[in-house]
Amino acid sequence: MTDAAHLLRLLAWLSPAFPTGGYAYSHGLEWAVQVGDVRDGDTLRDWLHDVLAHGSGRNDAILLRHAHCACDDKDTLAKIAALASAAVPGRERRNETRAQGAAFMLASAPWRGGLSRPDDLPYPVAVGALAGTHGVAEDDAAIAYLHGFTSNLISAAVRLVPLGQSVGLTVLAALEPTILRVANGTRTAALDDIGGCVFRADIASLRHETQYTRLFRS
C-alpha cells in the first residue's frame, strides 16, 4: 500500500492537470517549428530524443536526484537550486524552470503540510525535494518527471506544427526507451556531470526571445 500511495502522489504531482503552467512553455520548440527543424512526427521524435539524452532532460534528472537526496537539508537544496537556475541557456528557459517550480511548490501545499523549503526552487529541484520528503523512490520520481516533461513538449508540438493526437502518442511511445535510459543513466551522476551538447535546441530557446509571433512563453 505504501508503493500505491507513492504512485498516487506522482500521478497527481506530474499530471498535466497539476497547475504548474507547463502548457505555456515550448522549451524553444516554437522557434524550431517556425524554421522547419520540427515539422512532423519523425523530426519531433529526433529533437526530443536529443533534448532528453544530451540536454535539459538529462540535466533535470540529475538535479532532481540530488534534490531528492538533500530533501531535509535546506542549505544544500538552496545550492542545488542556484546551480539549476545557472545551468540554463537563456532568460526564457530560466523563467520556465523557476516559474514552474514556484507554481509546483504552491500547488503542492496539501502534501507539504508545515514543511518549509527554500524560495525559488526550479522545477526539477522542487519535484525531487517533495518526492524525497514523502519517501517516493528516486528512480520512480525521475522516470515520472521525464515522462511529464516529454508529454508536455509533445503537447506543444501537436498544437504548433500542427500534429494529430495519434502522431503525438506515437512519438511518446517511441521515446519510452530514451526516457528509461536517461533515468537509469543519471542514477550515479554527480552535479559536476551537468552539461549538454544540444546547441540547436539552446539556440532555439534564445531565438524565441525575439520571435515575432509567439504563442508560448519559451
Image (cartoon, rainbow, N blue to C red):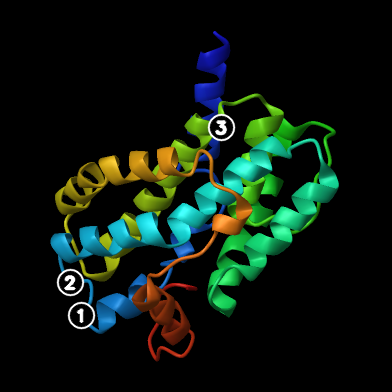
What secondary structure is found at the residue carrying circle 1?
A: loop
What secondary structure is found at the residue carrying circle 3?
A: helix
Marks 3 & 2, CB-CB < 8 Å contact: no
- Residue at the far top: name it: 1
Residue 144 placement, left or right of 37: right
**Neighbours of disc 2 within 10 Å: few (<14), some (14-19), many (20+):** some
CA distance separating discs 3 and 2: 35 Å
Q: What residue sits 56% from the left and 32% below the top?
A: 138
What secondary structure is found at the residue carrying circle 2?
A: loop
Give the labeled residue for mark 1: 36
**Neighbours of disc 1 within 10 Å: few (<14), some (14-19), many (20+):** few
Give the labeled residue for mark 2: 39
Q: Where is residue 213 drawn, in percent x and y? A: 38, 86
Image height check: is 142 above or below 140? Answer: below
Image height check: is 208 above or below 190? Answer: below
Q: Amino acid at mark 3?
A: Glu
Q: What residue sits 53% from the left and 15% below the top?
A: 3
Q: Viewer-nearest of labels 1 and 3?
A: 3
Q: Quadrant of the N terminus?
A: top right
Residue 157 placement, left or right of 2: left
Q: What residue sits 65% from the left and 57% below the top?
A: 122
Quarter of the image for residue 192 reads bottom right
Q: Can the viewer see residue 209 in this picture?
A: yes
Q: Where is residue 193 drawn, in percent x and y? A: 54, 56
Instruction: Pick the residue in front: 109 or 199.
Output: 199
Query: Which mark identifies residue 138?
Result: 3
The earlier-in-sequence mark between 1 and 3 is 1
